[in-house]
């Protein structure tokens, strides 16, 4: 293998960063024209099916929640995202990066997640203009939902 091929093999798709694997059911909430299309396309390519919208009644492995500062009450949105989520599912809260229109302060996320019954496990650079916060239901609470 050439050095170039090795470097190409090391590149991770945005869907890899989100832990998306083939066959996963992924729901998208809060889509608008400012969302990152490259990230969306990578998720669709990886899971092998279209993103489900918030009207779907399917149980999902991942919820992609696009959220901006002026979108309303974050706790309510996170609680709504829990509804279709499988027991071991993940909510990826996607927010504009610092300095971008609609930026959400990290303190707002760290305060809202526990109130909604979620724990924040990591934060990633999800796309050019978007950060991603990985939120899960704590193990002790999974059987109680």
Image (spheres, grey):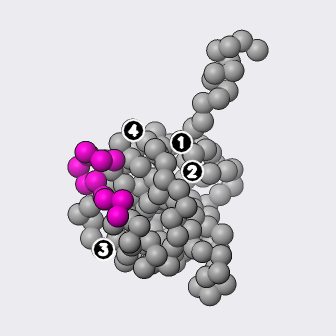
Magenta span: helix, strand or loop, mainly? loop
- Gap in Å between the C-alphas at discs 4 and 3? 25 Å
Which residue matches tag 1?
Answer: 14
Whether residue 49 is in magenta: the answer is no
How dense is the environment of label 1, judged by Cα within 10 Å: few (below 14), some, or many (20 and up)? some
Q: Are marks 3 and 2 in contact (CB under 8 Å)?
A: no
Task: Tell me: 8 left or right of 100.
Answer: right
Q: Which residues are magenta?
A: 97-107
Asked if residue 102 is among those painted magenta in the image, a careful observer would answer yes
Circle 4 is placed at which residue position? 128
Residue 96: x and y in percent read 33, 50
Residue located at (59% from left, 85% from top): 145
Label 4 packing within 10 angstroms: few (<14), some (14-19), many (20+): few
Nearer to us in this view, 114 or 132: 114
The correct choice, above or below, for 127 with respect to 25 in the image is: above
Query: Which residue is under mark 2?
Result: 18
Judged from this view, the residue extending furthest toward the top is 2
The residue closer to the viewer here, 58 or 132, is 132
Q: Position of residue 86 (x, y in %)?
A: 63, 72
- Rendering quarter of residue 46: top right
Quadrant location of the N terminus in the rendered image:
top right
């Amino acid at each position: 293998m050439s050095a170039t091929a090795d470097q190409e093999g090391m590149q991770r798709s945005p869907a890899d960063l989100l832990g998306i694997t083939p066959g996963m059911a992924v729901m998208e909430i809060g889509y608008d024209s400012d969302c990152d299309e490259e990230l969306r396309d990578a998720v669709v390519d990886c899971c092998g099916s279209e993103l489900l919208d918030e009207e779907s009644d399917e149980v999902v492995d991942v919820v992609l929640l696009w959220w901006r500062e002026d979108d309303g009450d974050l706790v309510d949105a996170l609680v709504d995202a829990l509804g279709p989520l499988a027991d071991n599912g993940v909510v990826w809260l996607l927010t504009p990066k610092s300095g971008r229109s609609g930026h959400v302060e990290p303190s707002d996320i760290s305060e809202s997640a526990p109130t909604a019954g979620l724990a924040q496990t990591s934060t990633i650079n999800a796309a050019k203009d978007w950060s991603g916060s990985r939120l899960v239901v704590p193990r002790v609470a999974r059987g109680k939902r």
